[in-house]
Image (tube, rainbow, N blue to C red):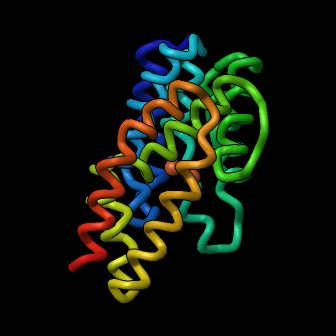
């Protein structure tokens, strides 16, 4: 259980940490992940606060990838250290740490909260809104139109096929016709 004061501090910590992230992994991505994490937590009857904290903190070390580090590992450690410093109990900290550690790795099973963070994060690749406004422009910025579209499409199906919870799968499925229509439209241009 987190207090309002703890939540404010965690958000501020995140805002500070993600300043160096690439454009696809700033606050809009975090807010979106938190929104889906809470929705899935309700549907899957998971711990809402663990899901909230995991989603809020999951990409705090994304920028370290540029230095050859795995942001799931460094993010999990940095988040756990910070939560411990805030006086949050060990069991809660371990759950958040586990979810963040695995959010950029393939896995089977695991806690509901771990599965929810993965799904909530990947909703950012499978809704039309995210695909159109963040994924495609991100690849377009550095690649030719054809290559960017291929990458975006590849990433879309990679994530689409790997959702864990039934709430996440159902939600991703809802957006599929719209994303596919949009891809077809771009391909025909
Ligand atoms: Fe990430
Ligand atoms: Fe993320």
How many marks on residues?
A: 0
43 over 118 or under it: above or below: above
Q: Quick check: 88 left or right of 5?
A: right
Give the side of residue 86 with respect to residue 77, left or right.
Answer: left
Vertical placement of residue 103 versus 189, above or below: above
Identify the residue shown where x is 34% and y is 48%: 177
Relative image position of residue 64 (x, y in whole percent): 61, 65
Residue 60 visible in the shown view: no
What residue is drawn where x is 25% and y is 77%? 188
Q: Position of residue 47 (x, y in %)?
A: 59, 14
Outermost residue, left side: 189
Image-quadrant location for residue 171? top left
- Residue at image point 65% right, 56% down: 71
Quarter-wise, where is residue 141 in the image? Answer: bottom left
Identify the residue at horizontal 54%, vertical 18% (top origin).
49
Residue occupying the far bottom of the picture: 144
Residue 82 in sight from this viewpoint = yes
State which quadrant residue 12 falls in: top left
Instruction: Tell me the quadrant of the picture where the N terminus can be found.
Output: top right
The quarter in which the C terminus is drawn is bottom left
Image location (x, y in percent) of residue 13: 47, 41
Vertical placement of residue 130 versus 113, above or below:
below
State the residue in front, 136 or 7: 136
Where is residue 114? Give x, y as percent. Answer: 67, 32
């Amino acid at each position: 259980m987190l207090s309002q004061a703890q939540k404010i501090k965690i958000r501020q910590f995140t805002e500070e940490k993600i300043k160096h992230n690439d454009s696809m992994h700033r606050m809009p991505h975090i807010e979106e992940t938190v929104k889906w994490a809470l929705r899935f937590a309700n549907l899957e009857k998971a711990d809402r606060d663990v899901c909230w904290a995991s989603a809020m903190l999951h990409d705090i070390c994304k920028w370290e990838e540029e230095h050859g580090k795995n942001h799931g590992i460094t993010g999990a450690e940095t988040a756990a250290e910070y939560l411990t410093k805030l006086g949050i109990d060990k069991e809660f900290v371990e759950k958040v740490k586990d979810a963040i550690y695995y959010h950029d790795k393939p896995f089977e099973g695991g806690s509901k909260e771990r599965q929810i963070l993965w799904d909530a994060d990947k909703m950012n690749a499978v809704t039309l809104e995210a695909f159109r406004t963040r994924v495609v422009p991100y690849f377009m910025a550095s690649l030719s139109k054809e290559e960017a579209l291929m990458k975006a499409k590849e990433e879309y199906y990679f994530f689409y096929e790997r959702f864990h919870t039934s709430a996440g799968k159902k939600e991703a499925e809802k957006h599929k016709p719209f994303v596919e229509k949009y891809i077809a439209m771009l391909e025909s241009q």
